[in-house]
Amino acid sequence: MKKRFVFCTTGLVGFGVYQARTTVVKYTDIDYHVFTDAARFITQECYSPYNRSTYRYTPLLAWILTPNIYLNHVFGNLLFITCDVLSGHVIYHILRQRGLSCEAACGVCSQWYGWDFLQETYLYHLTRRDIRHNFSPYFYMLYLTAESPWSLYLGLAAFLPQALLLLLVSLAFHRDLALCWFLHTSIFVSFNKVLLLLVSLLPVVLPRLTMSPKKGLGLLALWFAGQGIWLAPAYYLEFEGYNTFLLIWLAGLLFLIINSCIMVQIISHYKPLHIFYI
């Protein structure tokens, strides 16, 4: 099993390098290049990683990826894959530790990079108006009002539907953590100004769903169809330079409706876990 994993991992990394060099659509996410550029600022120019625009992560990430500059650009890929596999094991042992202070790590970074760390890592996201995360139902509004004096307030207002839904879901399903986690992530993905993946939480919900396989496959096909409809105009914007912002926004609204319908179906067909309290 370990040999197969090493073989598959190496093969996928090699494929990613090949595709990045030979095709227009890249295998590696753009954020990886942002990480690498931040590491380059540290190693070659002795600057803060936050000198790289759009770098809004912990400075430790840029330091960890300095071998991308000194050794090879693929180092980070191999590191992330290894950490992904080991994350479950590591998280389990971290939770068993006593006296481990997350606040200490945050405090060190705050002292190290000061206000830049606090602003770029945490505070920035409260007023974030990122028009490049085009899955968001808000992106077109934020794009058109980017220079407006109301832009800051619109960014804050975009949090209100999400915050209200998260509160209602917490009150309704707090006794069933698996469903509550999944719905929280789904709502965050669908109603937020940026995109995260929720597939990782689906396995904890699937065993308690009572819907038929036919209906489940239908919802899955609908979900992929929504992404496909969005990806078509997104491709023409990103790689062909066509102005498809309106089509992308409409496709994003359709994807929001699809995600909302899927969440309703999951709630309707979910068999709650009965917990007895003494």
Image (cartoon, rainbow, N blue to C red):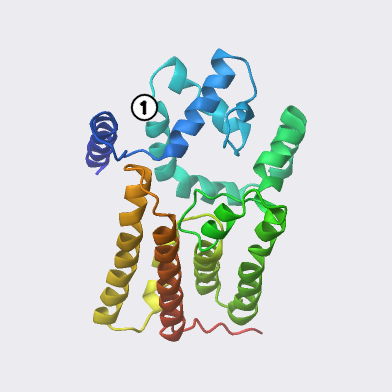
Q: Position of residue 205 (x, y in %)?
A: 43, 72
Q: Residue at x 34, y 68 (%)?
A: 223
Could you tell me which residue is drawn at 52 percent across and 20 percent down?
40
Residue on which the image places disc 1: 74
Foreground residue, 6 or 114? 114
Q: x, y (%) of residue 134? A: 46, 54
Residue at the (53%, 68%) spot, across then down? 187
Which of these two is toward me, 107 or 263? 263
Q: Position of residue 139 (x, y in %)?
A: 53, 57
Can residue 139 be seen?
A: yes
Q: Nearer the viewer, residue 101 or 17?
A: 17
138 relative to 68 in the view: left or right? right
Task: Determine whether 191 is above or below 126 in the image.
Answer: below
Given residues 201 and 25, the one toward you in this image is 25
Left or right of 47 in this view: 181: left
Q: What crowding class fits label 1: few (fewer than 14 Cα within 10 Å), some (14-19), or many (20 or more)?
A: some
Q: How many marks?
A: 1
In the rendered image, which quarter contains the N terminus? top left
Residue, x 55% and y 53% (percent of image)? 143
Residue 114 falls in image quadrant: top right
Viewport quadrant of the C terminus: bottom right
213 versus 41 height, above or below: below
x, y percentage for residue 220? 30, 70
Task: Name the residue type under label 1.
Answer: Val
In this view, 156 is above or below 31 = below
Q: Is residue 101 visible?
A: no
Q: Is residue 135 left or right of residue 173?
A: left
Left or right: residue 101 versus residue 27 is right
Element marked by disc 1: loop
